[in-house]
Amino acid sequence: MDKSSVIFGNIIDKKTLRKAAAQQKKFLKKFGDDRNTPYHLAAMDNEVLTPAFGAKVLVLSKEPLGKLPEKSVIIGNIRMGFGHYRISMAMASAAHALGYTPLWLDLNSFPETTCTKIIAYQNKLYSMASRLSQKSKLFNKLVWDPLNTEGFKRLTYNAGDQKTAELMTPVLNDLPKETPYIATHVWPSQAAVHAGFSHVVNAIPDNWAMGLHLSEGSLHLVQTPSSYLSYRTLKGFAGEKILNPMSENDILYAGHYMDDEMVSNIESDCKKRLERINGKKPLRFLLTIGGAGAQGDYFASLIKTLIPYIKENKAALYLNIGDYENVWDFFKSKISGIEKLSKTHFNDWNFTKNFAENALNDGDCTKEESHGIHVFCHKDIFAAVYATNLLIRSSDVLITKPSELAFYPVPKLMIQHVGGHECWGAIRAAEVGDGTPECPNLEWACSMLCQFIKTPDLLEKMNHAIMSNKKAGIYNGAYHAVEKAAGIEESKYEWAGR
């Protein structure tokens, strides 16, 4: 099924098609051709995902796939950094809340397959370039930012990806094609369409429209009105040339992709934040390290700025370093005296869950959750990602680059972006009032940290905005993704676009 030659009625030039075919040929030569290989899957419980959402993880099996739960939703994703996993967890949480069993399908988790080899190869290049962009301003200015803003935006880029996605279908052949399917990265969406799935939702991340994210044959969901209009009209996807637009049946504005437990507890979580602010309790800052591993020196400087306030019991820091224990060694080498202020909580998922629960239910500012620095690290990738989600609810400020976390219902300090496409995430947060504009440099970010502590009315306003946003349906995107994939017509959740 050729999806490269014509994209939403726009004919792709022959030069681009030759390039796309050459790239596919290169991958076949490098990683092998398994399009005729029969792969089988099994749905297995997972220590983190199953208790949290009733989710099951799809893994390779020697036996054909058995009967799936009657109400199943496939969550197609890849591990590329932590962002797509985090969005997938939001989809799984919403599916569970609506009575469905989420089936976790990570196309980057089958090392025997050509599909995973291609994704792992490209992920390695992306991570390497991401880290380099933080070390070299010249590389960032001349290569990385332009690629992430304009290179990935072009419609011709989608033609190449579509040709590559043809090689990602074999692992999907064991699954019933009528199963509701939500993709949180474009490759699982394109692969599902190529494999013949009939109910594919392509949940587009970020807030900057790019040809990279197109998956014709799926229903495209976006999180913001501005990205809806840009995608609908394919504005800028071929420079100043006016393209044939997408139809209204190809795309919907759904709202931010959020976990059910976050959305359903917004009022109580914001109320507790306001109580901590008014009670002059230590403000809890959450800093999370993503999977790409960039911005180490920048993060160290932010922590140094907070340390005097931590010593004065005006602030506490939750530091989630994901599954990278070496990051803690880096911080110990960069920040003098950090160990004396810190407690490490490594590879103990039950402790992390209990810590997050205790922090939510604090009424006593003498509890350990309100003081010092708490460092979390989990070798298990699911725990590494989901720890941040658990800690968000009891945090007063999330320190994050404007990536997928820019859309979360918690007051946010938006530090510098890593890829240029992220900038519009901060713009969205600032517009709806639950985050700052992007800090243009380190000095500005450090200043904002101090401002939050010295003038906490800024955080009061953000919490009131979050509660208003909930009433407007802004955080209901994950519910609507499930509804559309499963063909649910009625819902108690209001559409963000209404």
Image (cartoon, grey):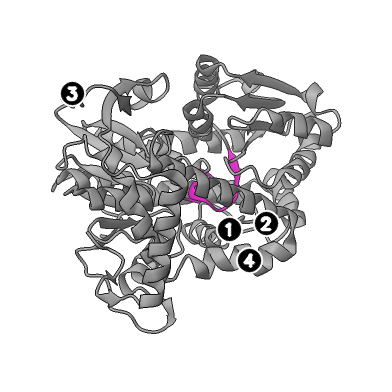
Mark 4, residues whose alpha carbon is within 10 Å: few (<14), some, or many (≥20)?
Answer: some
Q: Nearer the viewer, residue 5 or 331?
A: 5
Residue range highlighted in magenta:
396-410
Residue 476 visible here = no
Q: Amino acid at mark 4?
A: Val
Label 2's element?
A: helix
**Secondary element at tag 4:** helix
Which one is earlier in the sequence, the residue at label 2 or at label 3? Answer: 3
Q: Which mark is residue 143?
A: 4
Say whether marks 4 and 2 touch (CB < 8 Å).
yes
Query: What amino acid is found at the position of numbered circle 3 in the picture?
Result: Gly
Quadrant location of the N terminus? bottom left
> Mark 4–mark 3 contact, CB under 8 Å?
no
Q: Quadrant of the C terminus?
A: bottom left
Q: Residue beneath label 3, please?
A: 66
Residue density around tag 3, few if under 14, some if 14–19, many if 20 or more, within 10 Å: few
Residue holding disc 2? 133
Residue furthest out toward the bottom: 241
- Residue at 47% of width from left, 34% of height from top? 269
Residue 275 on the magenta span: no
Whether tag 2 and tag 1 are in contact, CB under 8 A, the answer is yes
Q: What amino acid is labelled 2 in the image?
A: Ser
Residue 340 falls left or right of residue 472: right
Q: Is residue 265 left or right of residue 315?
A: left
**Residue tagged 1:** 419
**Which residue is at the far right?**
336
- Spatial CA span between label 2 and label 1: 8 Å
